[in-house]
Amino acid sequence: MYTLSSPTVLATDAAAHPHALPLLRGLSGAFRISEDGAYALAQAWHDRDESAHGVAWVLVALLDMNVPTMAETLKSAGATMSAESLATGRFGTSSQVAALVATAAADWPDAAIAPVPGTGFVPASAAVAAAAAAGLWARPQLEAEQVAALRAPFEQAASRAPLYESGDSLYGPRSTAVLELIDRVRTGQVTPAQLAGITWPAGVWAQAMHEAAWACHRENRLREQMRAVLDVTLEFVQAHPDLSPAGIRECTAALHAMTVSRLVADVADEKAVGDLTLAEFGI
């Protein structure tokens, strides 16, 4: 299951996806939709092809019923599954990604009138963003025609009006530090070999990330954390197009520790920040 407080799970699964770059871009966009953008999305929901949209959602639900999650894959893998095959597994489903977007990606300004399968009624703007994300996540198992049907309202809105927030505070008060890391990743100063070689004692990374998430919750930075983790991951995948899914998964723990430590260095527990910044010593 994907949550706003644990963006590393979503971002890592997205980075190992067969269509990682458009998926990461789409997810990042979903978490920076402005109020004006949300109203444009709501209008596009009313203009959608109801039949094609509904059929596509049904097919997503059917796929979700038959595609094993990472937990199921790990339970049945035994010793026969290769690392690469295992790395393409995902912890959640397309519908769960849609639910996260619909409930947490923005403060949707319109009324909850639109059904999203598995989530219930949500604002029409949220339903459009959720469908677009689900369509990207369900590829390549979902046919291109159904992906297009799910994404059509979002793309229509994007063609009519600017959808996204902009400015220097997308990542909160510590945006400058996050942008510095993005630049280092983009310019190749942070390499897969460096990241894959960074390890923590058992449980230390998870506890530090948990403490950082609580800090983000207290300071109302959870969306900023999600944006930062998604965007740093996007830059890393873009900078290393030949890296395999297994190779990507070897790198994301350290990459996300570097991201989150920058985001919460001013508000998180000192020990947690120290544990996360251990990643810096391997770079």
Image (cartoon, rainbow, N blue to C red):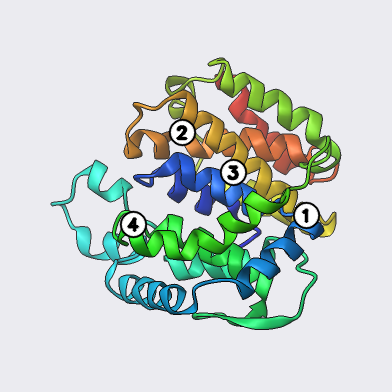
Q: CA distance from mark 1 to mark 2?
A: 32 Å
Q: At which x and y percent is residue 79?
A: 16, 52
Looking at the rendered structure, the secondary structure element under dot 4 is helix
Name the residue tied to disc 1: 34
Disc 2 marks a residue whose amino acid type is: Cys
Q: Position of residue 149 (x, y in %)?
A: 44, 65
Spatial CA distance of label 4 from label 2 is 31 Å
Q: Which residue is mark 4?
A: 144
If you read the primary sequence from the N terminus, does the residue marked by circle 3 or circle 4 appear first?
4
Amino acid type indicated by mark 4: Ala
Q: Report how far apart the C-alphas of labels 1 and 4 lie in the structure.
A: 28 Å
- The residue type indicated by label 1 comes to Ser
Q: Is residue 156 visible?
A: yes
N-terminal-most mark, 1 or 2: 1
**Residue at mark 1 to residue at mark 3: CA–CA distance:** 18 Å
Disc with the residue nearer the chain's start (1 vs 3): 1
> Residue 182 appears in which quarter of the rendering?
top right
Q: Earlier in the sequence, mark 4 or mark 2?
A: 4
Position of 188 with respect to 111 (left or right) is left
Q: Would you say 190 lies left or right of 67 here?
A: right
Horizontally, residue 262 falls left or right of residue 150, namely right
Mark 1 touching mark 2, by CB under 8 A? no
Earlier-in-chain disc, 2 versus 3 = 3
Rendered-image quadrant of the C terminus: top right
Tell me the residue that label 3 is attached to. Answer: 230
Q: Earlier in the sequence, mark 1 or mark 4?
A: 1
* Marks 2 and 3, how far apart at CA: 14 Å
Report which residue position mark 2 lands on.
251
* Residue 21 vertical placement versus 133 (above, below): above
Residue drawn at x 37%, y 65% is 146
